[in-house]
Amino acid sequence: MRKKTFAAAALLTVAALTLSACGSGGDGDKPVAEVSAEAGSDKAATVLDQPFEKPDLLLTDTQGEKYDLRAETKGRPTLIYFGYTHCPDVCPLTMNNLAVAKKQLSKAEQDKLRIVFVTTDPDRDTPAALGKWLKGIDKDVIGLTGDFSTIQAGARTLGISIEPSTKDKDGKIVSVHGTQVIAFSPKTDGGYVLYGEDATVDDYTKDLPKLVKGENP
């Protein structure tokens, strides 16, 4: 089960981020952080009142090369998602939604956009495993892996909590992680828009042209 919690603070709507145990069937979801957002909208996108700073992450890409997230994506519209390749539901759905929506952009817009998938299960998600999985979704998605503690700390700066992989009651390994997609502006490099797991292909298709320009969706 997955819960969504909303609370009012001052004149801002505060969206509580949640953890999701992908495929575990458990009830381990709980609010883990709160972010301020502009009030009054039924849109899938939450425009953040205080943008996130891009995580200072040095990880390894699918080619086995070091990847400096800030340096490599500086000045480019960037979408970041934390998940894992063995996830049976939310992660592949989210990534496929992004990939399908991206194809609706012009070639020039596609070339500008960076979609980054950071694994929450680095023990199994080696560079080769990440590359194989992402090739079936979108070969241009940037897959990153590395030390779990480094990834966990980077996610935390975005208000996204992830936990070490564990075994469920059936002995299946699961990774519990936040399911938000954060969009970073090419103008400021700040993470100014947040999407929850309920965002659809249509939502991303409608918003991506604006996100590529650093505009509010």
Image (cartoon, rainbow, N blue to C red):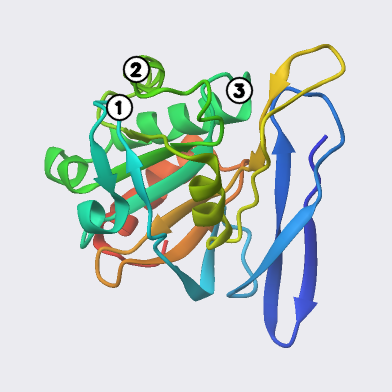
Q: Residues within 10 Å of mark 1 (few under 14, many from 20)?
A: many
Do the numbered discs 3 and 1 sit on residues whose CB atoms are within 8 Å?
Answer: no
Q: Is residue 189 above or below residue 95?
A: below
Name the residue type under label 1: Thr
Do the numbered discs 1 and 2 sit on residues whose CB atoms are within 8 Å?
Answer: yes
Name the residue type under label 2: Ala
Q: Is residue 148 above or below residue 126?
A: below
Find disc 1 in the rendering and name its residue: 62
Dot placed on the residue nearer the N-terminal end, 1 or 2: 1
Q: Is residue 141 left or right of residue 173?
A: left
Dot placed on the residue nearer the N-terminal end, 3 or 1: 1
| Front residue (pair 6, 44) | 6
Q: Residue 23 in the image: state x and y as whole percent.
A: 72, 22
Name the residue type under label 3: Cys
Q: Is residue 4 above or below residue 135?
A: below
The mark lying in front, picked from 2 and 3, is: 2
| Front residue (pair 102, 78) | 78
Q: Residue 40 in the image: state x and y as whole percent.
A: 65, 72
Q: Is residue 200 left or right of residue 135?
A: right
The residue sitting at 54% across, 53% down in the picture is 155
The mark lying in front, picked from 3 and 1, is: 1
Q: CA distance from mark 2 to mark 3?
A: 17 Å
Q: CA distance from mark 1 to mark 2?
A: 6 Å
Where residue 53 is drawn, which disc sits there?
A: none
Q: Residue 143 in the image: state x and y as whole percent.
A: 36, 33
Quick one: which residue is furthest to the bottom in this view? 10
The residue sitting at 79% across, 40% down in the picture is 2
Find disc 3 in the rendering and name its residue: 87
Q: Residues within 10 Å of mark 3 (few under 14, many from 20)?
A: some
Find disc 2 in the rendering and name its residue: 128
